[in-house]
Image (tube, grey):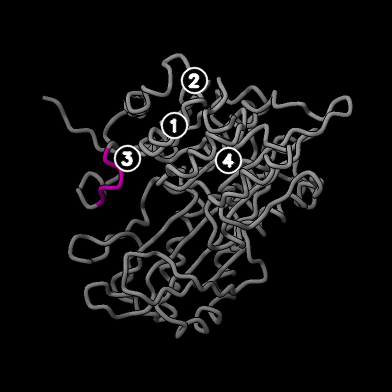
C-alpha cells in the first residue's frame, strides 16, 4: 500500500492554503517542469542553446517578506489570508518565511491584542487593521508596516513601539500605511514612519564573478560602518518600495547580470569615453549598482521618488562617484529617456529593463528597437509579457537566457535574457 507522504506544510495538506500548488512535487522536478514550460513559451525567440542552467531556490525559508491579512478579533487575531467567505486563515506557521520573519509574527499578533485595534472585517466593512507587512534583511533587521483603514490608531501604535522594540530588538523601521478604500489593494499612498530610520538596509552578498551557477545564500556582513565589501550590494528599501521576495535568488540574478555585462566597452581606456549604461524601472537600484564600475557611466530611472532616494543613499554608502552613477525620478516609458541621449551622440552601450508584470508594452518595446542600443538585459517576471515584447524587437536577438526560481512551488518564473543587436533596425536609419 502506498502511503501519502505529508508535505512541508500542514495548511497545504489540509487544503486551507493554495498558495503553493506544486508543494507535493519534488523541488528538482518542479524546476525541470518550469524550465520546460518557460522554454516552450519563449521558443520563437530564445534558441534552445541560449538557455543556461536555471537558478534554484531553497524549498523553504526563502521569503524575506510576509504580507499578512489581519482578521479575527483583537483578542484572537489571525495573520495570513482570507478564505472564500472572508474568514481569516492563520499563516504564522508558513515554512516559506525566513526565520526572522517567522519569529516576528507571534510578537506582532500579541501587539494586535495589546493595542486592542480591531482587525478589518472585509464582509462587514468595519474594523481598522487591514494588513501587517514584514520584511527581513539578510542581517535579520526588520521593517514592519501596519496598514490601517484610518489614522485613528496611529498614536496607539506609536505608544506600543517601545515594547515592540524590546521584544523585537532587530526592528529597524516601523511605519503605518493608510488605506481607506474597500478594495483588494494592500496599501495606500500615505505612509507615517514611526521610527528614526525610514528605510531598511538590505546587504546583499553576490557570488564572485563567474560563480553564478551556484545559488547565493543570504548573509550579513561585519563590514565596519555599514560599508560594502567586495561583491556586496547595499540597497536601501523605503517602506513603499519593491524588492524581490527571495533574497538568495535575487543575489544570483544581479550577479548574473553583472557577469553578462562584463565585456561592455569601451570601458574608458586610452582616453575613450566611458560605456553608458541605462537601467529603466530601476527600483532601489539593484541592477544599476551591480553594474557600476570603472569606465562606466550608469543612470537609473524610476518613477518612485522614495526608491530613487534609497538608490542614491546606496550609491553614497558604496562610495560610488556621483559623477558616474546617478538615479533620476521619472517615467521610464518617457520618450526622451531613450531619444534624448541618442540625439546628442551619447547612446547607451547597454540598456537594462526590469518592467512590471505587464512588460514593456508595444510602444516602449518599439522605441528600444529603434533607438540603436547594441545590448539589452531584460529581467522579466512574466514570460508571456517577455515573449510579446521580444516580438516587437526583431533586430535584437537573444544570446543568453536564464530562469530564476524566485517562487518555488508555483508557476511563477523570473527570466533574464541578454539581447544583442544583429542588424540595424528599420526605424533607426
Question: Which-is-in-front pick, marks 3 and 4?
Answer: 4
- Proximity of marks 3 and 4: CB atoms separated by less than 8 Å: no
Question: Could you tell me which secondary element the residue under label 2 belongs to?
Answer: loop
Eyeballing the image, is 378 above or below 125? above
Label located before the other in sequence (1 or 4): 4
Observer able to see residue 170: no
Q: CA distance from mark 1 to mark 4?
A: 32 Å
Residue 242 x %, y %: 52, 53
Identify residue for label 4. Answer: 218
Question: Which-is-in-front pick, marks 4 and 2?
Answer: 2
Identify residue for label 1. Answer: 390
Identify residue for label 2. Answer: 52
Question: Could you tell me which secondary element the residue under label 1 belongs to?
Answer: helix
Residue 182 lies in the magenta-colored region: no
Q: CA distance from mark 3 to mark 1?
A: 38 Å
Checking the image for residue 235, the label placed there is none
Question: Could you tell me which secondary element the residue under label 4 belongs to?
Answer: loop
Q: CA distance from mark 3 to mark 2?
A: 29 Å
Identify residue for label 3. Answer: 8
> Looking at the image, which residue sits at the far right?
271
Residue 367 x %, y %: 53, 40
Magenta span: chief secondary structure: loop
Tell me where the magenta segment starts and ends, as one range.
17-21
- The residue positioned 38% from the left and 35% from the top of the image is 388
Question: Which-is-in-front pick, marks 3 and 2?
Answer: 2
- Left or right: residue 184 versus residue 346 is left
Q: Nearer the viewer, residue 343 or 260?
A: 343
Eyeballing the image, is 283 above or below 305? above
Eyeballing the image, is 72 above or below 66? below
Query: Badge 3: how crowded within 10 Å, few (<14), some, or many (20+)?
Result: some
Amino acid at each position: 500500500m502506498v502511503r501519502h507522504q505529508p508535505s512541508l506544510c500542514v495548511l497545504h495538506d489540509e487544503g486551507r492554503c493554495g498558495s503553493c500548488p506544486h508543494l507535493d512535487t519534488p523541488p528538482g522536478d518542479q524546476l525541470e517542469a518550469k524550465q520546460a514550460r518557460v522554454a516552450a513559451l519563449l521558443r520563437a525567440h530564445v534558441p534552445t542553446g541560449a538557455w543556461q542552467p536555471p537558478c534554484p531556490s531553497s524549498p523553504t525559508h526563502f521569503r524575506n517578506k510576509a504580507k499578512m491579512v489581519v482578521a479575527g478579533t483583537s483578542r484572537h487575531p489571525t495573520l495570513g489570508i482570507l478564505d472564500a467567505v472572508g474568514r481569516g486563515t492563520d499563516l504564522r506557521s508558513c515554512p516559506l518565511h525566513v526565520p526572522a520573519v517567522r519569529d516576528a509574527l507571534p510578537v506582532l499578533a500579541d501587539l494586535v491584542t495589546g493595542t486592542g485595534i480591531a482587525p478589518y472585517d472585509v464582509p462587514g466593512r468595519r474594523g481598522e487593521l487591514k494588513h501587517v507587512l514584514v520584511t527581513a534583511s539578510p542581517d535579520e533587521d526588520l521593517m514592519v508596516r501596519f496598514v490601517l483603514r484610518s489614522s485613528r490608531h496611529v498614536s496607539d501604535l506609536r505608544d506600543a513601539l517601545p515594547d515592540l522594540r524590546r521584544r523585537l530588538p532587530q526592528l529597524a523601521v516601523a511605519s503605518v500605511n493608510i488605506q481607506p478604500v474597500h478594495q483588494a489593494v494592500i496599501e495606500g499612498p500615505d505612509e507615517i514612519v514611526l521610527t528614526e530610520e525610514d528605510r531598511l538596509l538590505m546587504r546583499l552578498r553576490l557570488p564572485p564573478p563567474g560563480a553564478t551557477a551556484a545559488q547565493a545564500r543570504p548573509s550579513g556582513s561585519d563590514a565596519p560602518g555599514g560599508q560594502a565589501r567586495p561583491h556586496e550590494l547595499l540597497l536601501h528599501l523605503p517602506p513603499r518600495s519593491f524588492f524581490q521576495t527571495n533574497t538568495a535568488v535575487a543575489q544570483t540574478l544581479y550577479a548574473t547580470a553583472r557577469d553578462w555585462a562584463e565585456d561592455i566597452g569601451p570601458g574608458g581606456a586610452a582616453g575613450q569615453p566611458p560605456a553608458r549604461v541605462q537601467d529603466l524601472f530601476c527600483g532601489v537600484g539593484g541592477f544599476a549598482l551591480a553594474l557600476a564600475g570603472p569606465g562606466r557611466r550608469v543612470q537609473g530611472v524610476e518613477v518612485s521618488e522614495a526608491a530613487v532616494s534609497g538608490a542614491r543613499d546606496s550609491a553614497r554608502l558604496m562610495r560610488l562617484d556621483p559623477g558616474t552613477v546617478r538615479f533620476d525620478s521619472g517615467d521610464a516609458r518617457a520618450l526622451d529617456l531613450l531619444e534624448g541621449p541618442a540625439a546628442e551622440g551619447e547612446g547607451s552601450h547597454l540598456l537594462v529593463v526590469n518592467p512590471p508584470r505587464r512588460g514593456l508594452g508595444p510602444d516602449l518595446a518599439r522605441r528600444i528597437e529603434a533607438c540603436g542600443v547594441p545590448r539589452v538585459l531584460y529581467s522579466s517576471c512574466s514570460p508571456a509579457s517577455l515573449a510579446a515584447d521580444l516580438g516587437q524587437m526583431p533586430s535584437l536577438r537573444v544570446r543568453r537566457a536564464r530562469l530564476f526560481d524566485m517562487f518555488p512551488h508555483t508557476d511563477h518564473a523570473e527570466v533574464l535574457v541578454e539581447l544583442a543587436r544583429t542588424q540595424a533596425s528599420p526605424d533607426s536609419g
